[in-house]
Image (cartoon, rainbow, N blue to C red):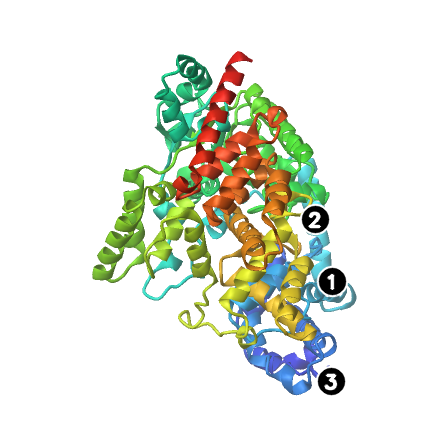
Amino acid sequence: MLDWLAMWGVTQAAGLIFKPILEDLAKDAAKDWAKDLLKGIPGKILKKLKKEDVEIAAGKALKEFLQLMQQQLKVRCKLAETEIKEYTGDIQKFISDKSVTEILGKAFDINCESLDAKTLEDTWNRLQLKPLPSKFNWQSITEQYLTQVQELLLDSKDLHHILELQKLSDIEINTKELAGVIVDFNLVKYQEGIRERYGNLKLDSLDTSGYAYNELKLWRIFTAQNVRETHQVLPQVHELPKEHLRRLRESDQVEAEVELEELERHKRVYFEQPIRSVLDVVNKKQDYKYLVILGDPGSGKSTLLQFLALNWAESPLDNVISLPIPLLIELRTYMRRREDKECNNFLEFFHQCSGAIAHLNQLELDKQLKAGNALVMFDGLDEVFDPGKREDVITDIHRFTNDYPDVQVIVTSRIIGYKPQRLLNAEFSHFILQDLDSEQIQDFIYRWHELTFTDAVDKVRKRERLQRGIEASKLIIKLAGNPLLLTMMAILNVKTKLPIDRSNLYKEVSKLLLHDWDNKRHLKPDDRLEIISLKDKQAMLRKLAYKMQTSEKSLAGNIINEDDLEEIFSTYMQSIDIPLYEARDKAFRLKEQLHTRNFMLCSLGDDYYAFMHRTFLEYFCAWEFLWQFKETQMLTLEELKQDVFGKHWQDESWHEVLLLIAGMIEPRFVGEILDYLMTQNGKNEKFANIFLAADCLSEVRNRNRIKLVDTQLYERIKELINYTYYK
């Protein structure tokens, strides 16, 4: 009988605390754990290896990994031997997870340059294992482990032939590629990647007691919205407050009616366009080969593209092989990879970049694109915030359509800030997503409750309560037309009635997301965060959003480095008398909780984080301004007018924050802000100050208290119409 511990070098490894793990594996050497670990080696090479060779390689690699784990805990984290031993059971469970063995096995691939430290970290958290010290560094472990395994392949007589077989295989692959033979274009794996990334609504971090959120599939809950085609993207005209339009129509001044008719020409043409299902438009490739889908935040732009990809991925491959392959590119991720020199174009992104759903060989992909066998979707043009870089992306998209003229292309963007001319010139048709209509809202509510509730009586009761809550307020009816907010309302309705204004709705939704559901989900609570209250979390998110929004990049600021994020949290914690050394540890843990359990922050990779949706950033930022104005009085009304509204009214990326502020403060203060905005010279900014003032006025619930300013604004809009007409 082979002495596996001796062959793995465990017998000679003095002081290995995690030796019991390897002793257990030695008893199971006949099982497939070793083969699972070496799946990083190409399959045809693995088949050539003897079973004994596989088990030796796997055992030696695991020994190295366990030594590195022990070294991190002992040297970097300063834990005593007894404290380190407490991790033995959790580490054994950790290395048994398939996602972990897959990553560790990739170190045996001689072409591997790095291992996915972030997934290892996320897996540790997902398995709810004993929290690691804040100084524990997964990136350092993966780098050292990769080096150690590659050295094993080079130096070990037992393992060197694994290296030689891979070299011979690489020579064969390179020869075939030079000869034009395409490899590694695995559509089955690509389908799996799409389902894994986009299949679920990712709501399992919320209260799941009695509700099957974790089983809620996007393709089952997706509601196809309607769209209208627009030939002139003019948000200011489309969003002119209805009350002012009505008052102008009723005016007995003939010239005002004439000017209104001229001003509304594009709007009238837009509303004369037929309403169509967005899926009908997408499916008419012969009529709409190039599409731009525009919409407000949370309107379902990204969800639409994910559904189109899932619709293909959920079908058996032999049924969809002749259908266009959906290629979904999140432009924010693409631009970061391009800036990091990982790729120069979209094909290279799919071929080799981290962040791609799955790697597809660019030679075969080029062949499929030239044949027109693809649906290419560019998501989030508005999230490329730097104007110069956004122009570069548009150039890339235009070049792509020239290179592959038979491919259907879809681009999504927010309406605000979108400049249509270049894509109009490139023959892109533009459509605006419509709010969900009453029938679609009811359909969503019905399917939501059918799919998430197991108790029949509770299902009907909660469904009817949500319907009544939405119908009770015109404002809530309007908000329910937004798919994101409707989803949040459905979640909120489980516990309480809906509020009737937007800022309070956001407040309740954020409270829902920040609530600690760990006990109900049978997760291990992090005792070290017990001292952090809901109010503390809200305060830290306000400061985080304020920092991100007021950074030089403005809304490009929905991205922040991990160190800066933790510094904001740590600084706040010190202000509530938590010692520095504890504050840093708790800041790290809170970041992880908000990311992995609260659905509030998301990881962008490379140590960067963002709010899960920009709506939350805008709400918390507005709340921070309110806090400084009302609670701490660090911000005077004059400063609010000049330094907040005065400084940012020209910047459309700030408008949502300013509108939320207007909805949070007392009407008399809003009146002074509106009066201030009307005094600004907006001629060079297409009178954005007046349109913003009108939008702010619509946020005021009791407008009788500022009736004079309301009338003055009405007169200014009439003047603006006259000015526009005579120009």
Point out residue 327 in the picture as x, y percentages from the top left corner: 53, 38
Q: Quadrant of the C terminus?
A: top right
Q: Is residue 467 above or below residue 321?
A: below
Q: Which residue is mark 1?
A: 150
Point out residue 319 in the picture as x, y percentages from the top left corner: 39, 39
Can residue 523 be spotted in the picture?
yes
Please identify, in this view, whether the residue under mark 3 or under mark 2 is nearer the observer: 3
- The local secondary structure at tag 3 comes to loop
User: Which mark identifies residue 170?
Assistant: 2
Dot 1 amino acid type: Gln
- The local secondary structure at tag 2 comes to helix
- The local secondary structure at tag 1 comes to helix
Dot 2 amino acid type: Asp
**Rendered residue at 46%/18% (across/down):** 263
**Rendered residue at 36%/43% (across/down):** 475
Asked if the residue under mark 1 is in contact with the one under mark 3, i.e. CB atoms within 8 Å, the reply is no
Picture mark count:
3
Q: Earlier in the sequence, mark 1 or mark 2?
A: 1
